[in-house]
Image: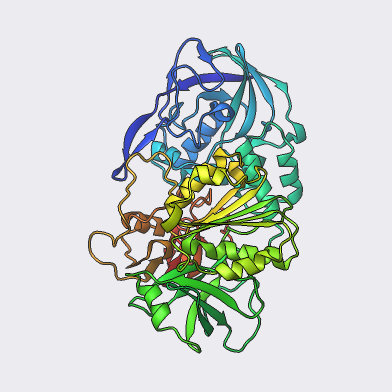
Amino acid sequence: MARLLSLNVGKPKDVPWQGRTVHTGIFKSPVGGPVMVRRLNIDGDGQGDLNGHGGEQRAVLVYQRQSYEYWRDQLGRDDLEYGQFGENFTVDGLADDEVHIGDRYRIGEAEFEVTQPRVTCFRVGMRLGEPEMPSLLVAHHRPGFYLRVITEGLVEAGDEIVRTRTGPHEMSVADIDALLYLPGRSRDDLRRAVDIPALSPGWQGSFRDLLAETSIEPSGWQGFRPLRVARVVPESASVTSIYLSTPDGSALPRPKPGQYLTLRVPAADPAPVRNYSLSAAPGETEYRISVKRESHGVVSTYLHTQLGVGVDVEVAAPRGDFVLSQEETPVVLLSAGIGVTPVLAMLHALADSGSTREVWWVHTARSVAEQAFAQEARDVLRDLPHARERIFYTSDTGRLTQESLAALGLPVDATAYMCGPDGFMADMREALIHIGLSPDRIHSELFGSLSPINPGLTDTSHTPPHPPAGPVGTGPTITFTRSGLTVPWSDSYSNVLELAEACDVPTRWSCRTGVCHTCQTPLLAGAVRYTPNPLEPPSLGTTLVCCSQPMSDLVLDL
């Protein structure tokens, strides 16, 4: 008979970690006597990061006595006490390879349902003083698991644990954990997993994404290759289009509407790298980018003044997830200024496919003189039977507002794609949600740094990216394209993530040991080695910055 050996709770607190502060609830201690277990928590307990822990689906974390004994032997430690893995329930039995997602258990007065394995998070490594612990838990098939509270009630150490229901498909906690984090997964197992109602929505979404990804073949080319300027066409007082083709006129990989190119140009030393949206219909032999000249922009000035027909420029393959979906619902293409470029490519794609979708073309520019592609957009819109156009000029009517957007009568079942300055996109997203569009149907393109994911950190920096403090490195150069920064590598850093953090480059991570792939970043050029090796290699053309070191100069879309 399985049994609850220890009931552990702890409130979130701030703890120092690598010169920073982490707000975390992983520090748990045993408590005696009956304790009330409620829908969202155990009395006296709490979580510091509700994005990754806690909530209805992760109200209670379970870990086993047998796993404690295993890690004491594996790590050579005799100081591991119950609660140290951050669990609420330390149990005898309920092994990860025997408990199924969807199983239900009665403990004391309460009943619980198994919802998912433990989240791979750096804080368990921080708590144990074993940084690689998130990776080890997965690799050794001992993650532990979360419970949802079906019936609230009192529980206490010593209570028997009785299984009251077996989950559908009988997929164990260890099986589900491996299915997400380890290679060799099968589509049949993914289909079985998403068919388990008790599996938490986050894990179901991840498995649906994996089902969709398995049919996608990589396209394009690795690193940079020379493309030749075929034409240069002024579009407005400040915007110029540059047409690029292969030097021998051969076919180019066909991009998806909305994707962008990355250019490396000899405008300075080291050569800066910038991203530019493809602004025309996907073609077989030619790409078009459209560049706005900025008053102090080194690269845009070079492209406007130095780049002529016949000149070669280094280009990375089309990439980006801001792409037009294949649906029949209405579509809103919303842009401001030079943000028109990716949605213009989408507009071309809709017309070329003979789409009968309802299309709303909504654009804001400073003035008629500064509106690029005005006639081109009108010509394309005429080929779409259900298209509507609305143009706003800020010099005449002011900025596009929530009220003016609401007055257009946009269909609430539409999918929206928008691109423009950060403030514009934040305001428009709020406005679209306000008038009834679903948040998950609002997509935006952002060429600046992505919003960071740094779970638990309380002192995240808003300092612009800069070279790191201390002696200048002597290793390969590392270029962070979204941050506009190139710095030399130094062996004083354990991995590329640490260098990025030292430069205040916005980063995304969770496990910091190559398990969760939150830090997966497009690698435009260069080669890396891994320490430690990730449990599953990253996607082609990407790297895991949390555990990679450069073997050559790197160009990262970060």
Residue 310 left/right relative to 167: left
In the rendered image, the residue lying farthest to the left is 470
- Residue at image coords 58%, 76%: 287
Residue 279 in sight from this viewpoint = no
Using the rendered view, name the quadrant where residue 558 is placed: bottom left
Estimate the x, y position of residue 543 in percent, counting from the top left: 50, 61
> In this picture, is 25 found above or below 141?
above
Residue 58 left/right relative to 305: right
Residue 209 left/right relative to 195: left
Name the colouring of the figure.
Answer: rainbow
* Camera-nearest residue between 391 and 116: 391
- Residue at image coords 72%, 59%: 215
Q: How many marks?
A: 0
> In this picture, is 313 found above or below 365?
below
Q: Quadrant of the N terminus?
A: top right
Estimate the x, y position of residue 361 in percent, counting from the top left: 60, 57
> In this picture, is 359 found above or below 298?
above
- Residue at image coords 43%, 49%: 452
Residue 171 in sight from this viewpoint = yes
In the rendered image, the residue lying farthest to the front is 396
* Camera-nearest residue between 141 and 35: 35
- Residue at image coords 64%, 74%: 253
Estimate the x, y position of residue 176 in percent, counting from the top left: 65, 41
> In this picture, is 476 found above or below 174?
below
Using the rendered view, name the quadrant where residue 144 is placed: top right
Estimate the x, y position of residue 270 in percent, counting from the top left: 34, 75
Using the rendered view, name the quadrant where residue 504 is placed: bottom left
